[in-house]
């Protein structure tokens, strides 16, 4: 299960979500709280506010959380 704290750690570690606002970051964490197992959805939200490709973000999340 992905937690907000663990996702925050991963985003900092890999420089994900650097293009997002505080409000967008809050919405990402709300999504994690509601649907923590949907890695594809979480990766998509991160991708919108990141410079990395969706594939790289998705693969990183799978490696970190699965």
Image (cartoon, rainbow, N blue to C red):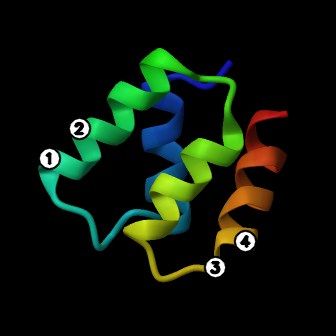
> Could you tell me which residue is drawn at 42 percent across and 41 percent down?
8
**On-image quarter of the N terminus:** top right
- C-beta proximity under 8 Å, tags 2 and 1: yes
Element assignment for label 3: loop
User: Is there CB contact under 8 Å for labels 1 and 4?
Assistant: no
The residue under the point 48% across, 58% down is 46
Mark 2 to mark 4 CA distance (whole Å) = 22 Å
Q: CA distance from mark 1 to mark 4?
A: 24 Å
Real-space Cα distance between discs 3 and 2? 21 Å
The residue under label 3 is 53
Q: Secondary structure at mark 4?
A: helix
Say what secondary structure mark 1 lies in. Answer: helix
Q: Which residue is mark 1?
A: 23
Q: Is mark 4 in CB contact (under 8 Å) with mark 3? A: yes
Disc with the residue nearer the chain's start (2 vs 4) = 2
- Compared with residue 21, is residue 8 higher up or lower down, i.e. above or below? above
């Amino acid at each position: 299960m992905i937690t907000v704290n663990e996702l925050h750690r991963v985003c900092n570690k890999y420089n994900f979500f650097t293009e997002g606002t505080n409000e967008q970051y809050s919405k990402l964490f709300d999504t994690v709280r509601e649907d923590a197992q949907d890695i594809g959805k979480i990766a998509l939200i991160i991708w919108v506010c990141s410079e990395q490709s969706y594939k790289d973000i998705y693969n990183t999340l799978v490696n970190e959380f699965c």
